Each structure stands twice: as C-alpha cells, then as structure tokens.
Image (cartoon, rainbow, N blue to C red):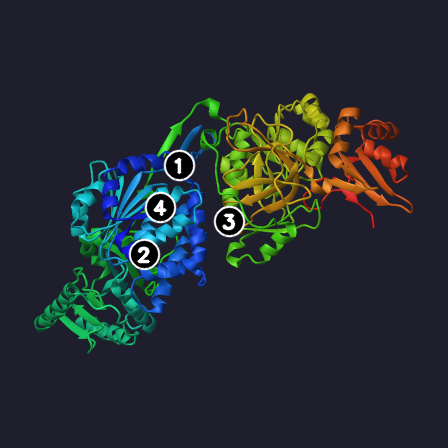
Amino acid sequence: MTDTINLNHHYWQGAFIGDEEAARRLATLPAAVEAALATPLDTETVLAACDALSRALRNPAHRVQERLGPHLPEGTDADREELLAELAEFLGRASLTRKLRRELGGTAPQRLGRPDAKETVYEAWAPVGLVAHIAPGNAATVAPLSVIEGLLAGNVNVLKTSSADTFLAQHLLAELAAQDPTGALAERVIVLRFPSSRQEWLRLMCAPADAVAVWGGESAVEGVAAHVPPGCRLVEWGHKISFAYVTQDAFTDEETLSALARDVCLFEQQACSSPQVVYLDTDPGNTEALHAFAERLATALAAQPAPAAHRALDPAEYAELTTTEHLARLEEHLGLTRVLAAPDGTWRVMADSRPALTASPLHRSVWVKPLPRKDLIATLRPMRRYLQTAAVAGSRTDIAELCALVLAAGATRVTPVGAMTAGYAGEPHDGVYALQRYSRRVAVQADARFAATACLDDLARPALFPPPTGPLLDKAAVQDLNRGVERSDAELYFRSGGSTGKPALSLFTYEDYDTQMHAAARGLLAAGYDPARDRTANLFYCGGMYGGFISFFSILERLGGVQMPMAAGSDHRATAEMIAAYEVDTLFGMPSYLWQLLHEEADLLRSYGGLRKIYYGGEHFTEEQRRTLTETFGIEVVHSITYGSTDLGPLGYQCTESGGSVHHLHADLHTLEIVDVDEDRPVAPGETGRLVFTTRARRGQHLDRYVIGDLGRALPGRCPCGSHAPRFELLGRLGEVMRVATYFLNYRRFVAIAGERLGHGGELQAVLTSGASREGLTVRLERGHAPDPERAREAFLAAYPEVRSAVAEKLLDFRVELVDGADLDRTATSGKLLAVVDRRR
C-alpha cells in the first residue's frame, strides 16, 4: 500500500495516478474541465457528501480515520484529534449552510431565481469554471478546505500541494468523493503533488483556469502570477500582519494580559490572525508605561504552557529569529528598545518606542509599541495591504471608536483580545468572501411568458438526488426525533392543526424556515399569483402556535406582495367590509372558512365585485364548489396555495396548468416515494400508495422517509407548464378510509357522489358511532347545498355498493342529516373541517 501511495501520489477525478499519467492528463486538462462543467453541480450534492464525511470524522470507530491516519501531519495524538475535529466541524452541514447563506445568500445559490418577484429577471451565482488552488506548505487543512469551497461554488478544482506535504489533501478529498454516489464530486477534483520548480506543470494547470487562488508571501504570489492568463481572476491569500491595541484602562488588567499571551502562544503565531505587535494608546515618549507593560506581558507569556517540542525551527526561521532579537538588543544602547526573553528562548517581548508597524519573527515573539489613537490611521494605513486582525482592549466606548479607526486604517476584522484566532462559520477572509471570489453573478432577463416561472432551472432539467435509504418513519417516530433535536436548532416551534389526531410539535431553525418560505413563494408564483398587482387578504387561522397565518405572511413578505393580514375571525361581516374597503382581490385561507365567509356575506361581496383569485390550503374545494365560486362569485382563479405539513413544510405546489389535487413536488427541498398501502414496497408507476417524503434542505432536523399519512399517485410525463418537477395527485388521507361494518369505506367517495349525483357544493362530514347491535354511519351535509336527507340517502346507497350491502346485511345503520356549516366539527387550532369523526367506543 505504501509503495502504491508513493508511486501514485496524484488524485485525478476519482483515481490515484503516477507522474507519467498525470503529465499526460495535464495536457488534456481543458477538455476534462469542459466535460465536467457540462452538467451543473447541485449544492445539495456537496452538502450531503460533506456532512457524511463530517459524521465519519467524528466517529472514532469509523474506518475513514484509520485510512487518513498515515497522512496526518506529525504531532501528538491530541494534535491529530484536534485536526480531525477541525475538519469535521468545517464539513458539517450546519457550518456549510451558514457559510453559503452568508456568502452567497442561500443554500442553492446556483439556481436562477427571481430576486424581485415582481420582475421576470433571474439571477444566480454561477461557478467561474476551473479554479486552480496553490496551497501553502505550512497549513495541512488549507488545501482540501479550499477545494471544498470551490466545490460549494460549483467549480472544477485543480489543487497543487507541496512535494514536502503529506498526502492528506489527496486522501481526504478521495474520501469526500466516495461519499457521493453520483460521481459529480470526483469529476470536479484534481490534486497534484509537485515542487514549484516544475514550472511546466504549474503553467499547464493555470493556463485554462478562470481563477487562481494562491497562499503565501509576495514572492510566492509573484511566482504564480507569471502563469496566470489575461482575464483570469487572481485570488491572493497572502501573509498578513495582525496586532492588538490596548487602551490605558487595560494597561494593568491581568485578564487582558493573559488573553494577549494566549493569542501569542496559540499556533505559535503561525496564523495570519496571531498578534505580531501590541500597540499601547500612549505617546512615544512615555517609555515608562511602555516598559512596564512589556514586563507584565513577559510575565503572562512565562505563565503559558511550554510550546510543543515536535517541530524544530528550520535554518531560515532560526536565522530570522536570532537576527531580529540581536538587532533589538543592540538598539537598547540607543534607548530605542528593550528586550525581555525567556532563558530557554521560547518567548521574547521587544519593547520599541517607534510606532511603525514591524513584522515579528513569530514563535512567541511580539513587539510592544506606543501609538496614540490620533496617529493610528497615519501610522498604519501605509501598511494596509498587509493588515488583517486587530484585537482591541478597552471600555465599550473605546472599542466602538477604535473599531472605526482600525478598519479605516486597513484592518479587515476586529476581535476581543483572547479571540484573535477564533472565527465563525461564514466569516469573511482578508476582507472578502471566498465563495464570491470563486463565483460569478449572472443574470437572465425574460419576457412576460415567464411571469409564472419562479426558477428557470425547473424548465431546463430535473433535480436529481441519491435515493433515500433507511426505515420508514411515522408521526410518532418523528416526534421522538424532535425530542432529540439540539436546543440550538429549535428556534421556531409550531403545532399541527390536529385534524388527524393529537396536535404534534414541529421544530425549525430560522434558516430552515426561511428556505421553506422562499420555496413556497416560488410555488405561489407558479400558480399565477402576481405580487405586482394582486391585493391579498391573509385569512388563515392564527394563534396557538399554529403556523398557517404566520407562514403565509412570511411568503407574501418574501414576494413583496400587498397584504391585509386579517386572519380568520368569527365576525364575517367585519372581514367582508374590510375586503371591500381595502379593494382586496385575492383571498388566502382554508376552504371551509372561505366558503362560510362567502356565503354568509354573499350580498356584500357580490356587490363589491372585486374578488378575482382564491388560493387555499389545508383542505380541498370539490369540483361543485369550484363551479359555485366561479359562477356565483365571479372568481377567475382557484388554486392550491401549497401542499404541505407542519413537520416538513411546503411539499408541493400547483402551477397554472394544474387543477384539483394535482401538485408539483418541491424537488429542490424533497424527494418523493410512493409505497404500497399495506407493504413497505414501491408501487407500480401510476398506482395509488402512501406518500413518503425525504427532506433535503434542513439543517436542524433530518426527516428521512417520513410517511406523512396521505395517499396519492405519481403522474407520468412532463407538465404542460414546462417544468421538470415531478407531479403527483393527492387522493386523500389514510384516516379517511374507514373500517365500518366489515367494509372499508372512503370519505372521498362520499364527497364525489355528493357532487356528481346531488349537485352538492357544500361541506360534508362522516360521523361513526356504535350501537347495541350494529355500527352507525351518518353523512352530515351542509344545509342549503343539498336536497332533503332521504333523497340524499338513496343516492348514496345507489352509488356506493359497499354501503348498500352493509345496510342490506343489517351490519350498518346509515343515515344522512342536514346541518348548518357552523355546527360541523372542526379542529380548534386551524379551523379545518374534520372529515371523519369517530365516536365509537
């Protein structure tokens, strides 16, 4: 194995190869890049693979750690564990989704969406194409993590590592590619290990590049820049200088001194964010304060743990260190400096009365200099190209004032002392976002034909993700998972409406909620909603932690639509008056509520005559009800606002070509399986089965293969609207199939018979009871929309053979009654009609 590694130390699109093969392939690099870029890379593919590798790196028993072990840098076991933990943290879905949101605005930045829903203008972050990464030799994780940033932006990546480096980058990226069953990641990763003296290879990898990212000092950047072609973006991650600034209030503060000492000692000042200079807010002539502070800082450095002994200084480092110290000691005789050093040479403090910024030789060597704040910009701005982190110690007012000064001088980040090398997910690096440097902002202007198209990608190709695996989950299993959600991921709590049982709790991060609301907003555009013209009354129920009203408020907010947030209320007269007064033309709400409102206030709303559109959710309008809305109230558009659940969020949407219960899948959020009602196996194409969803865009909660409780079937072929998103038809809920008098009866069948045979356009409810000798079934029809009960009973018996047989066999008491809509049983939270009320004991 070792011989193979030494011979085949290059990784090229999924295979380890040797020098001869690498040289041959380098000559054909442009063609390989073009082939890889022909298929876009979904960000979710990268996130899923990275998260899988992150979990493997956190598991000490996983074989990936054993395979990577020989390629980790030298050090103690604790050092190696820390490095793996650092990699695992970076690769986790939580870190990467936060990074994507901060740097590119969302978790699917490559999709051409409408930043302003009122315009048919589409924008996206597109990959630059090929990114060449020239990695440093002194930071083991920089090389592979830079490639992962390139992958997040959708690029093909070629990485050069030093011939003195370990094989960590090659093997870590190979492990990442192994987590992607599509092969898309492997196709976009090339790792070459060669010395910088091999200029021909450097030229060949840079020649077709669209961006070249290089780490190192000026000489390293200059050496690479010579090979960067015109028009190629050069991304410099050069050496930077960081400093601390301490106000007089903190000169003697022990916590400040200890924190500064930790910043100096952490990573032995090898990080760009490590302090090389400590500035004091005092005049250059105040040598007494300068020397006193240097002595206190020296004491704090002496109290720090000794440096690790596993790495000796190379001759160049040792020469720079000793030369700097000796020169500073010579200048002591001129009254310019004072040097305090450990007897064993492990640290040194060099007090210098001259404010000019001076680089440190590192390895726990720090300058202490005076710099009054009035001179701060004039002193530091000439070095602005090299400045990075400034740690400020002082009062709250001092910190606020000094932040503005050091940023104006050229620093790119400000931290408290003690936190200079700490960062956060998605933090800018050297004043820029890496993902934006590896991306292009692209735009497409379209005409009015695209008014109902929220995302151009849906017209171009389907979203393809690896098939879900694992056991099926029911609602009880999901509730168990909720109890295990990290507290930090439980930021938003919703309760279900309870239409099919006890209300259940669902948890979201705000990031996940935002992703889902944007998806639902895109679905609403597809259904013909026009945020530039429609004036909307949001009439969903609100309160009791129910998410209906809040969610649709959020959706309209993201669309920029005109909204009257009325909510569903019992005073239908007041609601109707507001609709007329504010010239509302579009209603959002539950069918049962909207039906009651329209019929109770029919005279006022018909005389107003401004209603044109209804978007409903949570229930369905029957065909007869749709006909009534059109003919009686003049409604032109009746569409589902979304199909979803409290647990999973929006699952499907209707386009302008969809009707009834047909929806498109939100394929960028979920995958859909349809399994047999009685067995956990896929149904044949077009057959009815249980709908099973796996969510793909959740950070706080992973819901894989969730049996939501609905029945449906997949529809073949591409929709006339042009979208590649799969379509499915909802066919009721499992709870709507009733086991009564030895027969299985379907609530939907009763609704269909009522509409077709009786012209019934109102609501219908089935009530089950138990008697002394047989069970009872009462179909309750909304009064005013149906004939007399006996004629309705005869129609049901004639059209439903199973009901007729159960009655004939004296197994069932069947009757029909007419009731007012207000007397039908509904859920307390959402106001949704209870389709089946089971009162049997």
Tell which circle, 2 or 3, labels the residue nearer the N-terminal end. Answer: 2
User: How far apart in space, not on screen, are marks 2 and 4 (Cα)?
Assistant: 15 Å
The residue that disc 1 covers is 40
Q: Position of residue 259 (x, y in %)?
A: 32, 68
Residue type marked 1:
Pro
Count of numbered circles in the view: 4
Q: Secondary structure at mark 1?
A: loop
Q: Which residue is mark 3?
A: 510
Dot 2 surroundings within 10 Å: few (below 14), some, or many (20 or more)? many
> Which is closer to the viewer, label 1 or label 4?
4
User: Residue at position x 64%, y 36% from top?
Assistant: 712
Q: Position of residue 702 (x, y in %)?
A: 53, 50
Mark 1 and mark 4: Cα distance apart in space: 18 Å
Upstream in the sequence, badge 4 or badge 3? 4
Q: Amino acid at mark 4?
A: Gly
Mark pair 2, 3: CA separation: 36 Å
- Please report the residue visible at 40 percent of the width from the left and 60 percent of the height from the top: 65
Q: Which residue is mark 4?
A: 14
Q: Position of residue 735 (x, y in %)?
A: 72, 43
- The residue closer to the viewer here, 333 or 133, is 133
Q: Which residue is mark 2?
A: 168
Mark closer to the observer (2, 4): 4
Q: Nearer the viewer, residue 611 or 100?
A: 100
Quick one: SS at disc 2?
helix
> Which numbered dot is residue 226?
none
Residue toward you, 42 or 652: 42
Q: Looking at this rendering, what residue extends furthest in the top direction? A: 631
